[in-house]
Image: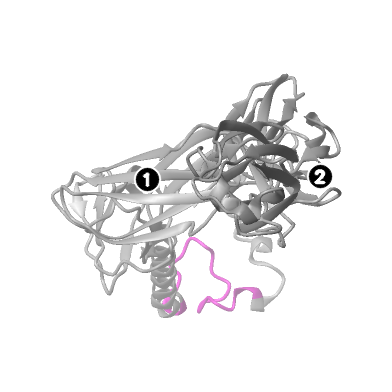
Amino acid sequence: MFDDEDKSYLGTSPTDYSMYDDYGKAPGNKIDLTNIKKILPKLIIGLIFLIVIFLIWNWFSSHQTLEFNITNKEGKSINDARISVINNSNNSRLTEQNGKYTLAPGLYTIRISADGYEEYLEKELVFPDDGFDQDIILMRDYSELSSELILDKTEYYSLEEVKGTIKLRNNSSEDYTNLKIKISASDINFENSERTITELKSQTSTDISILGSTKKTDKDITSNIKIEFINSEKIEKQTVLIHPKIELSKIVTTPTTELTNSKLEAGKDTTIDLIIANKHKTFALEDIKVDLVIEDKDKLNSWITFKDTTSYEKEIEFIDKEQNQTITFNITPDLSAKKGDEFTAKIIISAKNLDGIKELPVKLTIGTEKNVDIYAPSGKVNQKCSTTECGLVEKYEYLISNKGNVDIKNITLRLSEETVADCQSFFNIINEMPISEIKAGDSKLILMNIGSNAYSSSLIDKTIKCYFVAEYTDPLTNSKEVSNLNNSKIELTISD
């Protein structure tokens, strides 16, 4: 096919065909391949090396080594955790090497468990597309732990105490140890909010008391109390309602500024009323406490007490909205108090849902004091005597009066002489002594026999002057008193 004369296909330079031993021969003739044979093994080795590198790169890029970090919710390692990694395609379990697992692309199931913890399970994870979380948190297994939160009520007021009980029971066959509980709420501050139960044995129960206080609020709010069981997903919740407290201005007293009485009579009992009105249109005033604080420490006895109790405090369960309550006080001034004497105290009103305390001063003043006044009028008696005896005047009437304003008790009367010692001989009081009582403003009729069997000529034409002496217990001082009733003079004239 080539023209022997035309050699243009061979090129213009002999060097272009230096690889051929027989320069100038046509291509159709035999070629020497010695140089090709020399470099061909090197080319094959290079190609094999590239293929190996590709295969190694491809294997490492498609396989991944995993090392799991197993902890509880607090971040503490669980060293005895059991790990199972299964290749779903051939249902083969992978073996760990120094805690590490090597995974090829495929479908896997990962199962991790530990005593006392809930099992961690992930099925049909596609590797590497889904990725693997190597940091695993196991939750405590409290599936057999029953819990109940019992509160003292479901509605509270701002800044009110919250009480309750967490009832726990271990229904499992295993003991629970280091059971940790956290108590929280957005609008309640709890004391000892984190608790640890060292051990709760199988099939046993325990109660945990909780105590807290609601936060201050100016509107109705809903608060969720949450009981978290640490290291687990178990949570106990309860919702409560918190109301604002009643403003102090909504509680009105009558009298408004001072409980007072300036016309008291010493020793005379009386009463005085205090009206507490709840003007709020929505809420009742609850758990009211009225305290009576005695400020006058010099007084041995209080002039004011609650009518229906001997203590200095009174409790009222509630005063409904737009309603009022009347409290009656007994007023008992000292019997010995003088006109102008004062007694001071203070009434303090508080309530569970009252925003503050209300104070009302007490001022009691004596307008009339007590006095003791036994009065016996004067009298005259004429008595005739013979040579042997004097005549008898039977049942001579004499009136003893209590002109004071206090009752007098245990009164004993006797006669005393002004001139000679003959009063006891001639005057014989018939009334039984002592007289138990003569009330203030009242009188007592005294009966006497006048006369004597004794005769003395020296008494003829003489006048015997006698007067009463009263012995009694002074009601103002409670002491024994002897009073000479000098205005009670009785004159006895003797004649023959």
Tell me the number on the disc at residue 166. Answer: 1
C-alpha separation, residue under disc 2 versus residue under disc 1 = 59 Å
Q: What residue lies at 57% left-to-right and 46% top-to-bottom?
A: 426
Task: Say which element carries label 2.
Answer: strand
Residue 417, quarter of picture = bottom right
Q: Earlier in the sequence, mark 2 or mark 1?
A: 1
**Residues in magenta?**
16-35
Q: How is the image coloured?
A: one colour
Residue 479, quarter of picture = bottom right
* Residue found at the far left of this picture: 173
Q: Considering depth in this image, is 468 or 231 the residue closer to the camera?
A: 468
Q: Callout 2: 10 Å neighbours few (<14), some, many (20+)?
A: many
Magenta segment, prevailing SS (helix, strand or loop)? loop
Q: What residue did someone put label 2 on?
A: 366
Q: Considering depth in this image, is 422 or 389 the residue closer to the camera?
A: 389
Tell me the number on the disc at residue 25. Answer: none
What's the residue type where badge 2 is placed?
Answer: Ile
